[in-house]
Image (cartoon, rainbow, N blue to C red):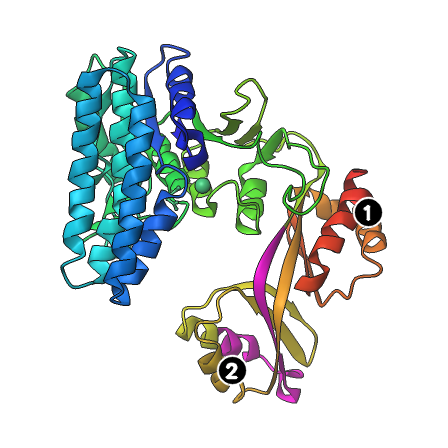
Amino acid sequence: MKFGGTSLGKPHRMQEVADLVTADSEIKIVVLSALSGTTNALAEISKLLSLNERNAAKQMIDALEVHYQDFILALLSDPKLLIKGKAALAEHFEFLYIILKISFSEALQKDILAQGELLSTKLFSLCLASKNIEHKLLPALEFMTLDNQDEPQVGTIKVKLSQLMQKNRETKIFLTQGYITRNARGEIDNLKRGGSDYSASLIAAAMNASVCEIWTDIDGMHNNDPRVVKKTRPVEQLSFDEAAELAYFGAKILHPSSIWPAQLFNVPVRILNTMAPGAKGTLISKEAGSVGVKAVAAKDNITAIRIKSSRMLLAYGFLRKVFEVFEKYKTSIDMITTSEVAVSVTIDSDTYIKDIIRDLEILGSVEIDTNQTIVSIVGNEITETKEIMRKLFESLMAIPVRMVSYGGSRHNISLLIPSSYKEESLQLLNEGLFDL
Ligand code: ASP
Ligand code: MG
């Protein structure tokens, strides 16, 4: 069971999470992220330190400490546990005040970012103790590791975590931190922002869990982006492939990397709502459940690049040369469309855009469109269903679509549009494809 920041962000919410983890007597591993807002604050503190703005950083640490002090006062009424809570805060905030005095480095930044999960698990452990709930806190830094390619290894996690669990045979509830891990050099590292979902799925895969429950603040993945369109509904069932497309192309509910471990080890993932624990949520498993379109999602900050060359005509090897440029600059391509004399690709990171353009210009003329959005239509066997294309194009008649990618997978049709048309497009698709 993984609980996100909003599920833990208020003392009464944390109490509710305690009820959820004790709702049945199955053995479980509870993975927690930091309380909502904490990782953002820690990231901001590291940024200020990297800019040597120590006063501003100190003010932020002060504010965070006050927030946590209020939090434990409301969470823990037993004076003995309150003393323990205060000691936990003292330890972590002391660390933050010490780093104010030392010089900033990337490794230090990772240490700072780790404080959120270290704190949330300690506080939740005290919350369980206040209810006399037996449990054991297993430090993620003792079993989560990255290899020298910065990739987590399910096999290693399995060996180390099994050993730790074996030492506590009587225990039914294990707690651990999401997001944080050690890297190949043994330093504290993390699985990137939003990575607690990934931790949960890696742990579930390693331990061959019967299910990986992701408890969040919405009742599952929705058919459209609830932040953009008014009416959306949860999707009951998705295959791993569909969920991967959705998570990657914009649905912010699940970290995209968290799909592969669950898929590889065939552990079903359930997305559930802490605020409405009885709601069905979304089940992600091997089976798609039904045929047709299930959801649309949008991904912003996309750059489209068109490379045009008469040399592409009847030539072979041209695409390889184009792709090599992106490989050289470690930039991944999301969408591709081609004609006989031109190829368009999209990228979501423009870190190396200048170098990429310079190298591509050797191959032909290059045009760039920034501020683009990929709208993805995701479902099961959608490219086999005629009606869907008609509805799709009819819905988007008034939208200047820049690229269409169809047939690359049976689960996805992607369209590239200028970001200024995103809201309108998602609304039109909501009506045209879902009658909402
Ligand atoms: N606390 C981390 C973050 O905010 C990890 C997570 O919440 O999944 O990114
Ligand atoms: Mg998250």
Which of 193 and 93 lies nearest the eye of the viewer? Answer: 93
Q: Amino acid at mark 2?
A: Ile
Q: Is residue 320 magenta?
A: yes
Judged from the image, the quadrant occupied by ligand 2 is top left
Q: Amino acid at mark 1?
A: Lys
Which range is magenta? 298-323
Residue 338 at what x, y percent from top left? Answer: 66, 71
Quarter of the image that includes the C terminus:
top right
Residue 321 at what x, y percent from top left? Answer: 50, 79
Position of residue 358 in the picture relative to residue 86 (left or right): right
Which of 126 and 329 lies nearest the eye of the viewer? Answer: 126
Which numbered tag is attached to residue 357?
2
Which numbered tag is attached to residue 386?
1
Q: Is residue 177 magenta?
A: no
Where residue 380 sits, quadrant-wise, is top right
Residue 177 shows up from this direction? no
Query: Where 429 sits versus 277, above or below?
Result: below
Query: Where 261 sits versus 43, above or below?
Result: above
| Residue neighbourhood size for the residue with mark 1, other residues' Cα within 10 Å, grouped as few (<14), some (14–19), many (≥20) | few
Q: Find numbered disc 2 in the image and state the secondary structure of the residue it sits on.
A: helix
Quarter of the image that includes the N terminus:
top left
Distance from disc 1 to disc 2, alpha carbons, whole Å, reads: 38 Å
Position of residue 247 in the picture relative to residue 71 (left or right): right
Q: Residue at x 71, y 35 (%)?
A: 291
Q: Residue at x 84, y 61 (%)?
A: 398
Which of 190 and 160 lies nearest the eye of the viewer? Answer: 190
Q: Earlier in the sequence, mark 1 or mark 2?
A: 2
